[in-house]
Image (spheres, grey):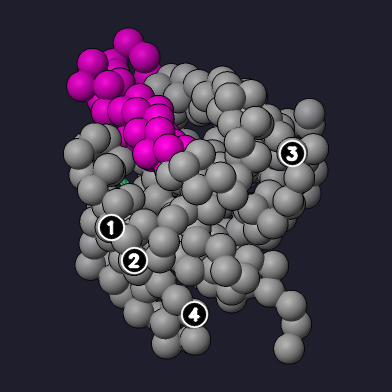
Amino acid sequence: MKSQKLKNKVALITGAASGIGKAIAELYAQEGAKVVIADLNIQQAEISAKNIKASGGEALAVSMNVTDEQQVNQSVQQAIQTYGGIDILVSNAGIQIISPIDELSYADWKKMLAIHLDGAFLTTRVCLKDMYKRGKGGSIIYMGSVHSKEASLLKAPYVTAKHGLSGLCRVVAKEGAKHGVRANLICPGFVRTPLVDKQIPEQAKTLGISEEEVIKKVLLKDTVDGEFTTVKDVAEVALFLASFESNALNGQSIVVSHGWYMN
Ligand code: NAD
């Protein structure tokens, strides 16, 4: 049997009931991790956990709205009680809201920053406390985006939040270092998940072009080959970062985007 890269590790992944987070949870479980699927959508999270168990993995679904301080703390405690601690946090939960700035409501602006930034802070804080207490180090991975580096039309709060994650990641890398905790940022290009499928018709409407044109002329315009990144591509990078054991790879961002934005 091939050696498992995350054997005896516990990984908590937010937003793991769908898309990129789900693929990361599945790959981590295949690599021997006990995975905690933390999501707003508990029904879907339970289905994902059940599927992982049916394939011989270990998984726990927990209900978590990443913007709810009490719920984040409680759900992480539940995971710690079940599996003994958290070794890997993947802060991944996210949504997209498309709007030009002059038409964007303050409520939508705040909602976006809350899910992406408050959620990353709240989950980081509680997991870091556990990692520091146990003294076994850890790995924190933030799901940024090419929008952590670049801007696009209609995405002001998303671009702002994704840039913000890169700042949080670097501070965690510095503060965590003496405890053996590393922090890194993954910056995917466009991946066909529900988050992207929803925005294609919305962008087509706002920009007055067809859905095919949104894909070719907006989403994939700057890739080297006109290809979408896949959930598997992103999961493989998340596995690499989680299983890289030294502080040498710390405070970095990895862009996985078919060449859209080159560091
Ligand atoms: P998705 O819609 O498939 O999955 C997002 C998951 O997050 C869902 O299961 C949803 O229930 C959960 N979620 C939403 N709000 C939540 C909250 N408040 N608390 C807990 N869970 C919540 O989307 P995805 O494309 O897999 O996106 C995952 C992450 O990847 C996001 O941070 C997104 O910004 C980022 N990302 C996506 C792409 C892409 O093209 N799909 C590209 C770059 C970065």
Relative to 229, 78 lies left or right:
left
Alpha carbons under labels 4 and 1: distance apart:
19 Å
Direction top: furthest residue? 102
Is the C terminus in the top left, top right, bottom left or bottom right quadrant? top right
- The secondary element bearing badge 4 is classed as loop
- The secondary element bearing badge 1 is classed as helix
Location of residue 56 in the rendering, given as x and y in whole percent from the top left corner? 49, 86
Alpha carbons under labels 2 and 3: distance apart:
28 Å
Q: Residue at x 47, y 38 (%)?
A: 128
Q: Is residue 133 above or below residue 10?
A: above
Q: Earlier in the sequence, mark 2 or mark 3?
A: 2
Location of residue 250 in the rendering, given as x and y in whole percent from the top left corner? 71, 34
Numbered badge on residue 247: 3
Q: Residue at x 57, y 69 (%)?
A: 8
Q: Which residue is mark 2?
A: 82
User: Quick check: marks 1 and 2 in contact, CB under 8 Å?
Assistant: yes
- The secondary element bearing badge 2 is classed as helix
Q: Main secondary structure of the magenta part?
A: helix
Q: Is residue 193 visible?
A: no
- The secondary element bearing badge 3 is classed as loop
Q: Earlier in the sequence, mark 4 or mark 1?
A: 4
Q: Amino acid at mark 4?
A: Gly
Badge 1: how crowded within 10 Å, few (<14), some, or many (20+)?
some
Magenta residues (range)? 100-129
